[in-house]
């Protein structure tokens, strides 16, 4: 089981922000912005580049979940960034698809 599967199964505690039957959103343990939440599908998809056509609906739900999280944490109007890492060079550290929702301060471009 990945770290995220253990969080979903409530085997590891997390500060949960929101949840649906398809996904879980919780605060990142190493925040890179005042708001830094991860939105993770409950179905294991190793990384975005390995999603299949059958995952299309779930991927849409994950993107809509980022809106819900941004509104709940008060960064919807000021702006937020969503990031999906793929592979080692992309910054992926947990092999379970997840979307970072970052906000609460101006975010530079290009990202590091």
Image (cartoon, rainbow, N blue to C red):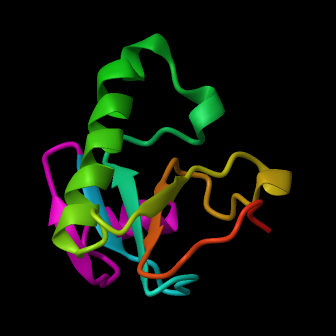
Left of 16 or right of it: where is 93?
A: right
Q: Position of residue 29 (x, y in %)?
A: 48, 86
Report the front residue among 22 and 33: 33
Tell me where residue 51 appears, x and y as whole percent.
Answer: 53, 26
Q: Position of residue 104 (x, y in %)?
A: 41, 80
Q: Residue at x 60, y 41 (%)?
A: 47
Q: Give the residue drawn at x 52%, y 85%.
A: 31
Chain part drawn in magenta: 1-22
Split into 4 quadrants, where in the image is the C terminus? Answer: bottom right
Residue 49 within the segment the image draws in magenta? no
Judged left or right of residue 13, residue 98 is right
Q: Quick one: 17 or 55, which is closer to the camera?
A: 17
Above-or-below relation of 16 to 76? below
Residue sitting at x 26%, y 59%:
24
Decide if residue 45 is on the left or right side of residue 7.
right
Residue 37 falls in which quadrant of the image? bottom left
């Amino acid at each position: 089981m990945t770290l995220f599967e253990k969080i979903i199964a409530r085997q590891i505690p997390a500060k949960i922000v929101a949840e649906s039957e398809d996904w879980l959103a919780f605060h990142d343990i190493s925040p890179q912005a005042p708001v830094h939440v991860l939105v993770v599908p409950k179905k294991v998809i190793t990384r975005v580049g390995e999603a299949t056509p059958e995952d299309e609906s779930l991927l849409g739900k994950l993107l809509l979940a980022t809106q819900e999280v941004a509104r709940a944490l008060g960064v919807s109007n000021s702006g937020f960034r969503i990031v999906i890492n793929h592979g080692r060079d992309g910054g992926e550290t947990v092999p379970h698809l997840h979307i970072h929702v970052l906000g609460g301060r101006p975010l530079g471009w290009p990202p590091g």
